[in-house]
Image (cartoon, helix red, strand yellow):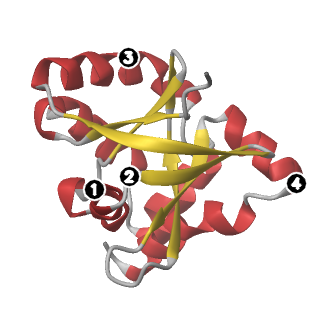
């Protein structure tokens, strides 16, 4: 990922405060905090999500299984999720069944216009960061059977 694209990827993490947090949550963007698999330090990334029953579903589209956040949650599935002004703990469950991945990709595709960065931010990412958000999403959904999807499930209440 080019340096400019990486900066645009990090931007929501920096901006996810106050009214902007609510705006990003309305665009179905959450902050996922994992534990670094080598360092044990918290690592936060912004991801598009899909509400799915009591769970939230995210996917590793741009780098797939090579995404650091994905490899971190495989090593330590206990994660922290921030949506808008609310934070919760969850457990990450990778979706292994290819048919289920296809089902989730189809749901994401129907939901996608309301998700992710607003249009002007997508344009800035494409022009200045060399990162075409919509192209990454389309590619991920076209290859859904091989793209890692993860269900983030809050702890069960007794």
Name the element at disc 3. Answer: helix
Q: Residues within 10 Å of mark 3 (few under 14, many from 20)?
A: some
Query: What is the quadrant of the N terminus in the image?
Result: bottom left
C-alpha gap between disc 2 and disc 3: 24 Å
Name the element at disc 4. Answer: helix
Q: Nearer the viewer, mark 1 or mark 4?
A: 1
Q: Nearer the viewer, mark 2 or mark 3?
A: 2
Q: Residue 137: give x, y in percent of width and height.
A: 33, 40
Q: Is residue 50 left or right of residue 31?
A: left
Q: Earlier in the sequence, mark 4 or mark 3?
A: 4
Q: Earlier in the sequence, mark 1 or mark 4?
A: 4
Identify which residue, 104 or 72, lies in the foreground.
72
Report the disc number at residue 74: 1
C-alpha gap between disc 4 and disc 2: 28 Å
Residue at horizontal 50%, vertical 35%? Answer: 49
Residue that mark 4 sits on: 18
Q: Residue 142: give x, y in percent of width and height.
A: 17, 31
Q: Residues within 10 Å of mark 1 (few under 14, many from 20)?
A: some
Residue that mark 2 sits on: 77
Q: Earlier in the sequence, mark 1 or mark 3?
A: 1
Q: Residues within 10 Å of mark 4 (few under 14, many from 20)?
A: few
Marks 2,3: beta carbons within 8 A: no
Marks 2,1: beta carbons within 8 A: yes
C-alpha gap between disc 1 and disc 4: 31 Å
C-alpha gap between disc 1 and disc 3: 24 Å
Residue that mark 3 sits on: 107
Q: Residue 18: give x, y in percent of width and height.
A: 88, 54
Q: Earlier in the sequence, mark 2 or mark 3?
A: 2
Identify which residue, 69 or 78, lies in the foreground.
78
Residue at horizontal 69%, vertical 69%? Answer: 14
Q: Nearer the viewer, mark 1 or mark 3?
A: 1
Q: Earlier in the sequence, mark 4 or mark 2?
A: 4
């Amino acid at each position: 990922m080019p340096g400019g694209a990486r900066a645009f990827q990090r931007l929501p993490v920096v901006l996810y405060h106050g009214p902007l947090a609510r705006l990003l949550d309305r665009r179905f963007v959450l902050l996922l905090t994992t534990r670094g698999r080598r360092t044990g330090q918290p690592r936060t990334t912004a991801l598009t999500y899909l509400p799915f029953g009591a769970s939230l579903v995210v996917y590793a589209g741009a780098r797939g299984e090579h995404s650091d956040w994905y490899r971190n949650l495989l090593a330590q599935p206990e994660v922290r999720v921030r949506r808008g002004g609310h934070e919760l703990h969850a457990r990450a469950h990778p979706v292994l069944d290819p048919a289920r991945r296809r089902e989730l990709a189809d749901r994401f595709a129907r939901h996608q216009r309301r998700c992710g960065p607003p249009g002007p931010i997508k344009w800035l990412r494409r022009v200045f960061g060399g990162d075409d958000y919509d192209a990454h999403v389309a590619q991920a959904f076209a290859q859904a059977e091989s793209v890692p999807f993860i269900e983030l499930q809050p702890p069960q209440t007794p």
